[in-house]
Amino acid sequence: MSDDVDVISYPFDQRDDLTLDPRYLALHERGPFKAQLLYGEPVWVATRYEDVKTLYSDKRFVRELGVGRDVPKMWPVDIGQDTSMIAYMDPPRHTRIRRLALPAFSAARTKTMEPWVQGLVDETLAELQQGDHEGDWVSQFAWPLPLKVATGILGVTREDAKTFRGWIDEVVGLHTPPPRRAEVHGLLVGYIRDRIAERREQPTDDLLSVLVHAREEDDQFTEDELTSLSLSLFLAGFETTAAQLGSTMYVLLSRPELWRELREDPGLLPNALEELWRWIPQFRQGMINVDWASEDVELSGGVVIRAGDPVTPEHQLANRDESVFPNAQEIDFHRDDPEPHLSLAWGAHRCLGAHLANLEIELTLRTLLERVPQLELAVPGDDVAWTKGRFLRSPEALPLRW
């Protein structure tokens, strides 16, 4: 990495709620900057919308160059070393895996899952409403619904779901000892392999079975690829959707005018979902993905990322780029044909389960607006507790009443 620019200690703070330190916004105005994260070698940080899109679309940025490097990161865990995971692959392997998997996650196929997901929304809402007009949104809905969906598409039985969730918590937990993390990872892999074997023997109508039997001419997934992809989908999709469900309800109900706006005009819901994905900062600090320049690449402001240098995207700042989203610090459900948010990445690295995550959240909000329009926070917004020890920001608990 070149030595002629200042290196900023980053992040400035490690807030758990949805606020952003104003110093981050000042850095956004500055464009790409070099930072020293909590762990690893220094890294360039891309904060502008177009620069972040470039990281995902320019083939000169790759991920497998990070193998064996002291990868920049916010947490003392190995990141980017397992190139069997789709998030850390480069073309042509990455291209092939996505090509085989995309039909299972297309908008059209996700649409066919709507009745099933709606049934799970209804079931989970009924469980929440068993209380006396009051309950905890996070433990009784925001986590159970994505767990039911994720375990359902992977063929995890209801009896095994609690155990499976416990394993996931340990694998993604920031404070899990490495030996235990490895042990639990092995348990997850073994469980998924058993489900794959069952579907080879007897096809079902769940998404795992679709992946098991996915084929393009003579090409199909290997056993290792199926296992890794299934695990990636669960690790990346389950907690992301749960956190977004928690934060979305917090934002809507801590700002009652937003909930009222949707009650009065439910047709705003698609726009509102896009705006909330854009505005809500997902990660406590920074992103977990790092790209590496395979050759010199110029980003905005004439900043040159030298060959071999790492660079990471700051989605939560790119999503508030004033040149792309006027009055970006405000939540506005009436933006005129806005650019897509980057919270679920972009291009070839966009989250495979993006359509499914959107479906879960949209059906949840539509159902609440129809059946529980009087929903409100049971505590002042400032009293809401936020998670600690997780990659993603979300309420630890969100007491609601109706």
Image: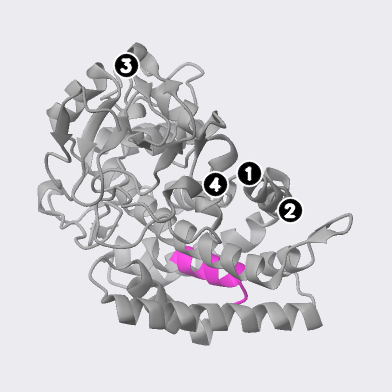
Look at mark 3 in the image and give the residue it sits on: 322
Report the amino acid beneath label 1: Pro
Q: Distance from label 1 to label 4 (Cα)?
A: 21 Å
State which quadrant residue 23 falls in: top left
Report the amino acid beneath label 4: Ala
Look at mark 4 in the image and give the residue it sits on: 354
Looking at the rendered image, the quarter that the N terminus falls into is top left
Whether residues under marks 1 and 3 lie with C-beta atoms below 8 angstroms apart, the answer is no
Q: Distance from label 2 to label 1 (Cα)?
A: 14 Å
Report the amino acid beneath label 2: Leu
Instruction: Determine the secondary structure under disc 1.
Output: loop
Q: Earlier in the sequence, mark 2 or mark 4?
A: 2
Residue 88: percent from the left, percent from the top? 50, 52
The reply to whether residue 130 is in sight is: no
Q: Distance from label 3 to label 4 (Cα)?
A: 25 Å
Instruction: Determine the secondary structure under disc 4.
Output: helix
Look at mark 2 in the image and give the residue it sits on: 100
Is residue 155 magenta-colored? yes
Is 202 located above or below residue 314 in the figure?
below
Report the amino acid beneath label 3: Glu
Instruction: Determine the secondary structure under disc 3.
Output: loop
Closer to us: mark 2 or mark 3?
A: 2
State which quadrant residue 142 falls in: bottom left
Looking at the rendered image, the quarter that the C terminus falls into is bottom left
Closer to us: mark 1 or mark 4?
A: 1
